[in-house]
Amino acid sequence: MNDEFTIRAALETESAQIKELVRVVGVNRLGLSWERFVVAVNPAGEVVACGQIKPHAENVMELASIANHPHYRGRGLARQIIEALLDKAPRPLYLMCLTHNAPLYEKFGFRAIQKNLPKYFQRMTKFFIVAEVFAQTGEDLLVMKLE
Ligand SMILES: CC(C)(COP(=O)(O)OP(=O)(O)OC[C@H]1O[C@@H](n2cnc3c(N)ncnc32)[C@H](O)[C@@H]1OP(=O)(O)O)[C@@H](O)C(=O)NCCC(=O)NCCS
């Protein structure tokens, strides 16, 4: 179904497109080194979807920056990007998401956790409570783990 899209490791020349895509979809704009990204590219050579494995202290790894441009949603691009990232990622692997996105990640075996959160996720969860996003959405932030 997605023959017209290429899923592959990002190129250095795509760094600005990745940052713009992340800005457009409204996910965390910190830590966007292009080297860690897998992207979906359309026939015009534009980056339309992306994701990365982001390292934190103490060897904690996060599936992060999962983003698809609104024009290209619902055709399996995020799924293909997540599959490509999971193929090479160590376990355990963590992520953070709003509650409405949890079913997407449950398809890959991620489960929400409340205990034994790595320090990075403890800090982010506390920060989120006072963050603007909560005021806007009224949704909870989940930390999920893939064993
Ligand atoms: C979430 C997002 C990346 C999904 O991208 P997408 O390319 O449309 O997703 P896909 O078409 O690959 O969907 C993959 C699967 O997840 C499902 N899915 C997608 N979004 C979902 C959601 N929010 N909740 C539940 N299921 C979802 C699809 O139905 C599909 O299921 P299937 O494989 O059984 O058919 C996209 O909507 C987006 O960029 N949203 C804004 C940014 C965001 O919230 N990112 C996630 C940060 S945690």
Image: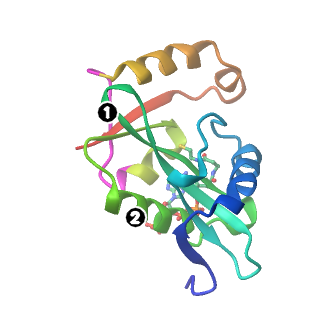
Above or below for 98 versus 38: above
Q: Position of residue 117 (x, y in %)?
A: 32, 23
- The residue depicted at 51 percent of the width and 13 percent of the height is 126
Quick check: which quadrant has ligand 1?
bottom right
Q: Position of 74 compared to 72: left or right? A: left
Q: Specify the amino acid type for callout 2.
A: Glu
Q: Quadrant of residue 46?
A: bottom right
Tag shown at residue 83: 2
Q: Which residues are magenta?
A: 106-116
Q: How many marks?
A: 2
Quarter of the image with the C terminus in it: top left
Q: Relative to the observer, which residue lies in front, 131 or 31?
A: 31
Q: Quadrant of residue 132?
A: top right
Q: Is residue 134 above or below residue 99?
A: above
**Helix, strand or loop at disc 1?**
helix
Question: What is the crowding at mark 1: few (fewer than 14 residues within 10 Å), some, or many (at least 20)?
Answer: few
Nearer the observer, 56 or 96: 56
Query: Residue 114 at x, y = what percent?
Result: 32, 23
